[in-house]
């Protein structure tokens, strides 16, 4: 297998008429990495992939693959292979012909192709299925054939456009591990697109969070989850409780926020915003449901929140309490189910406690849609 | 639907409908096997295959068929490629222009064929002259002009057929091919064309049929290459023979055969696809032992086999059957009949003359022969045929046709056309 090469996007702009689909993207992807673009539907993820694979010329800026500028180089000349959102398997070709299409183009003999197809079919755990038509395979099998077809072209960069979105949950989880394994085995660069944050977190070395054509943050899963740079990243990746307010004071990497409903709360400032947040700025503070804990009712302080319980639910691994929150949004508290008994608190006021380090504050901004 | 009146009227309606659709074809097919030299189904004289041999001896018809096939092939190639180009263009063009483009490209279907024929002729004549070429150049060649002229509108038909399929094509397939290293030409040849193949086949058949039957346009452009329709039209002007029925019969047979074959083939594919889905191997389904299984539920295949056997039987009979004796008998009978009638006529005249002499009156002009006693099954019916003048034993022209046969009169109007 070919070694992975790096991909760089430099000041990349892509416009469709007046509409800006990608705005000034700057991304450095290391060779051999599993890199994900994570963002809601319509934020420009596919557009970026199409620019990398050569189906779209950037309006401005450059795409570099392995350090080479790809300007003017067509998709059939780039060392990339794209797995389409709808897979785009050739419906009239058998599985083995599909897989080895890239060899047929180069004039390989049927025998060579058969041999290579069998190797790849073994790798994707579909031995002996080469003579079927794509329509005779299940969704997950088709998925794997698409991967094999792309790998057969021996690309340096494999681009995957939400390849798991059509699968059911179980299969999706299974394919996540499988994809990650394949990537580690072949060692080439994977650029993966998804709007599922679970997928991005479990598989990726690095993640770029996108919102409406803009890349909000790039970092590994832990950074994105624990140390979001924007309100959007904080609210899009995983569940999060938001507290709106204004910055009251800043002490180094901590700030005191005067929230609209819950009094003054202390929080860590997210790394990307240290030094940028000033007293009086509009701010948003985020605390994960699992970072909140029950405290003795009525306790006051800079890390205590008191609110009315609206309803509760039992989720199996956790017991969730929902409380009246800011701007119509509820505050969710997840208490791990480790055998203790729970009372029904509906209608009562309850006090919650958190570690200042587990709260993060960012400048006020757009939140992800629910 | 349960009302018997409604049900019966539906059946009656269907019967009338199919009689209307297929009746002429059936009658015409029968005439191809009847011996009289004017195409007629009744009375049945003798079974003959003479008209088929007559057909294959007719140089002009054969030449017409040859030209029609040449023109058909040319039209297929030109129309299908233009249609495909047009269809591809339709999917690529800016959405705003699409409606306009569609109208323009469909317009030739709406323009009368005569206009297309004249314009083709005038247009290429102009070009021919502008290039300073003579009357024998390619551009004024009948074959070239006919193909070009017919393709002007047949290409539009082809485009309609192709667009329908193209709309179901996923452009991502072409992109996938490019992404895997194919050039645009390779992606077109290996991905798009195979996908379009069924539609291309339909378009080709459509183009051939449209070309084969075209008269309006061709009549202006055929030059030295009269097609079959042109030849037939010219023949009909001088009267037709059952040889043309024979030709028509063959066309009908070929069409039915092709249709049945196609239907059977589709059914077969369905059966195979189902079997594949059910996990059986192809061999199990199409293998010799299981073949009868494939016939069950495939009415078309059964019909095809019956049809093929019938055809073989007919051709077999034709090679051994000799209608000469029958024809001789009929002619002998005709001769006797005619003689008898001449005799009758003479007697009648004699009696008339006697009466005239006796009465010497103006009303004696009645020439009506007494109705011949309908003693012969053929008697009255042959009389109309005699009007054609194609019978050596024809009686004098002044003989009155006897209209006592239910059929005799029916053919009269056509008989005026005369034989050849
Ligand atoms: N060819 C085009 N012409 C005009 N606008 C386009 C075109 N392609 C994409 N867009 C617009 O660009 C934006 C981003 O599209 P893109 O396909 O990249 O979204 P995405 O992030 O892949 O979404 P999804 O998760 O739904 O696939 C969308 O608003 C879309 O309407
Ligand atoms: Mg997309």
Image (spheres, rainbow, N blue to C red):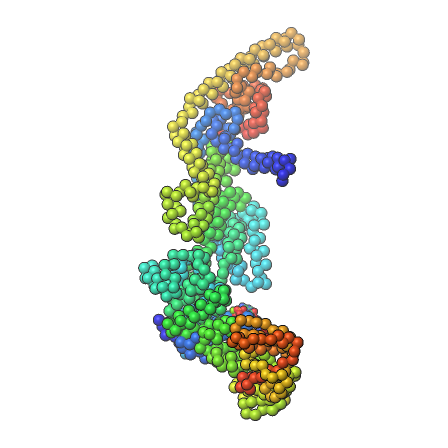
The image shows residue A84 at horizontal and vertical percentages of 47, 66
Residue B54, quarter of the rendered image: top left
Give x and y (percent) for residue B215. Answer: 53, 43
Which quadrant holds the N terminus of chain A?
Answer: bottom left
> Where the C terminus of chain A falls, by quadrant?
bottom right
Which of the two residues, B353 or A63, is positioned nearer the viewer here?
A63
Q: Is residue B305 above or below residue B281?
A: above
Q: Could you tell whether A189 is left or right of B348 in the image? A: left
Instruction: Give the side of residue A330 with respect to residue B174, left or right.
Output: right
Q: Is residue A253 visible?
A: yes
Of A68 and B156, the residue lying toward us: A68
Q: Residue at x 57, y 58 (%)?
A: B101
Could you tell me residue B356's position as x and y percent? 64, 10
Quadrant in which ligand 1 is drawn: bottom right
Report the number of discs.
Answer: 0
Q: What residue is shown at x 52% (from left), y 28% (from top)?
A: B41
Instruction: Residue at the far bottom: name it.
Output: A251
Where residue A88 appears, as percent x and y from the top left, is 46, 62
Name which quarter of the figure residue A212 lies in: bottom right
Residue B256, compared with residue A233, is above or below; it is above
Q: Kindly identify the residue that appears in the image at 65 percent across and 83 percent down.
A: A261
Whether residue A234 appears in this view of the structure is no
The residue at the point 58 percent across, 10 percent down is: B350
């Amino acid at each position: 297998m070919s070694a992975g090469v790096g991909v760089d996007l430099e000041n990349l702009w892509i416009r469709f008429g007046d509409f800006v689909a990608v705005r000034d993207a700057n991304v450095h992807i290391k060779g051999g990495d599993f890199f994900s673009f994570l963002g809601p539907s319509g934020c420009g993820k596919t557009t970026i992939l199409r620019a990398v694979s050569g189906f779209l010329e950037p309006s401005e800026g450059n795409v570099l693959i392995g350090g080479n500028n790809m300007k003017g180089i067509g998709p059939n000349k780039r060392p990339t292979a794209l797995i389409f959102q709808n897979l785009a398997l050739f419906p009239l070709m058998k599985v083995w012909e599909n897989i080895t299409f890239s060899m047929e183009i180069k004039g390989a003999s049927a025998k060579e192709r058969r041999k290579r197809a069998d190797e790849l079919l073994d790798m994707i755990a579909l031995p002996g299925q080469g003579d079927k038509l794509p329509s005779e395979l299940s969704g997950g099998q088709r998925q794997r054939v698409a991967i094999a077809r792309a790998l057969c072209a021996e690309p340096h960069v494999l681009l995957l456009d939400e390849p798991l979105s059509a699968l059911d949950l179980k299969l999706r989880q299974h394919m996540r591990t499988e994809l990650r394994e394949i990537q580690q085995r072949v060692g080439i660069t994977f650029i993966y697109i998804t709007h599922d944050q679970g997928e991005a977190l479990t598989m990726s070395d690095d993640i770029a969070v996108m919102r409406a054509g803009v890349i909000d943050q790039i970092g590994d899963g832990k950074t994105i989850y624990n140390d979001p740079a924007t309100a959007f990243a904080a609210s899009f990746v995983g569940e999060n409780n938001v507290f709106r307010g204004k910055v009251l004071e800043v002490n180094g990497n901590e700030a005191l926020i005067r929230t609209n409903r819950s009094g003054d709360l202390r929080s860590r400032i997210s790394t990307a915003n240290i030094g940028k947040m000033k007293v009086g700025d509009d701010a948003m503070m985020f605390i994960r449901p699992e970072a909140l804990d029950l405290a003795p009712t009525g306790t006051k302080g800079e890390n205590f929140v008191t609110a009315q319980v609206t309803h509760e639910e039992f989720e199996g691994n956790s017991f969730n309490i929902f409380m009246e929150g800011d701007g119509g949004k509820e505050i969710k508290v997840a208490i791990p189910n480790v055998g203790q008994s729970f009372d029904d608190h509906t209608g009562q006021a309850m006090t919650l406690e958190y570690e200042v380090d587990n709260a993060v504050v960012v400048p006020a901004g757009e939140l992800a849609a629910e | 639907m349960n009302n018997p009146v409604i049900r019966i009227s539906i059946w009656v309606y269907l019967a009338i409908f199919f009689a209307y659709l297929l009746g002429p074809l059936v009658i015409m097919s029968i005439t191809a096997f009847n011996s009289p030299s004017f195409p007629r189904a009744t009375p049945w004289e003798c079974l003959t295959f003479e008209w088929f041999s007559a057909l294959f001896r007719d140089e002009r018809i054969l030449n017409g068929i040859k030209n029609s096939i040449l023109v058909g092939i040319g039209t297929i190639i030109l129309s299908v490629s233009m249609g495909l180009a047009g269809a591809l263009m339709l999917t690529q063009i800016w959405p705003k222009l699409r409606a306009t483009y569609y109208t323009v490209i469909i317009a030739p279907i709406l323009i009368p064929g005569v206009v297309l024929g004249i314009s083709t002729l005038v247009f290429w004549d102009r070009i021919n002259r502008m290039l300073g070429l003579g009357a024998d150049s390619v551009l004024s060649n009948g074959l070239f002009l006919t193909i070009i002229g017919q393709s002007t509108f047949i290409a539009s038909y082809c485009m309609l057929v192709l667009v329908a399929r193209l709309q179901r094509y996923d452009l991502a397939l072409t992109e996938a091919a490019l992404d895997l290293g194919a050039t645009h030409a390779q992606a077109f040849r290996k991905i798009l064309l195979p996908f379009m193949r069924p539609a291309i086949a339909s378009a080709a058949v459509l183009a051939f049929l449209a070309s084969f039957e075209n008269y309006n346009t061709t009549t202006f452009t055929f030059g030295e290459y009269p097609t079959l329709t042109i030849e037939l039209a010219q023949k009909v002007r001088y009267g037709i023979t059952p040889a043309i029925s024979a030709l028509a019969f063959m066309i009908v047979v070929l069409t039915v055969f092709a249709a049945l074959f196609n239907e059977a083939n589709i059914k077969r594919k369905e059966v195979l696809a189902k079997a594949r889905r059910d996990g059986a191997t192809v061999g199990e389904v199409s293998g010799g032992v299981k073949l009868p299984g494939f016939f069950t539920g495939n009415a078309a295949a059964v019909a095809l086999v019956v049809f093929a056997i019938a055809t073989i039987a007919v051709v077999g009979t034709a090679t051994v059957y000799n209608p000469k004796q029958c024809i001789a008998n009929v002619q002998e009978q005709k001769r006797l009949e005619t003689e008898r009638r001449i005799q009758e006529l003479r007697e009648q005249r004699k009696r008339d003359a006697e009466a005239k002499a006796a009465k010497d009156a103006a009303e004696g002009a009645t020439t009506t022969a007494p109705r011949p006693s309908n003693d012969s099954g053929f008697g009255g019916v042959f009389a109309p045929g005699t009007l054609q003048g194609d019978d050596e034993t024809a009686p004098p022209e002044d003989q009155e046709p006897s209209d006592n046969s239910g059929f005799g009169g029916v053919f009269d109007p056509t008989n005026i056309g005369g034989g050849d």
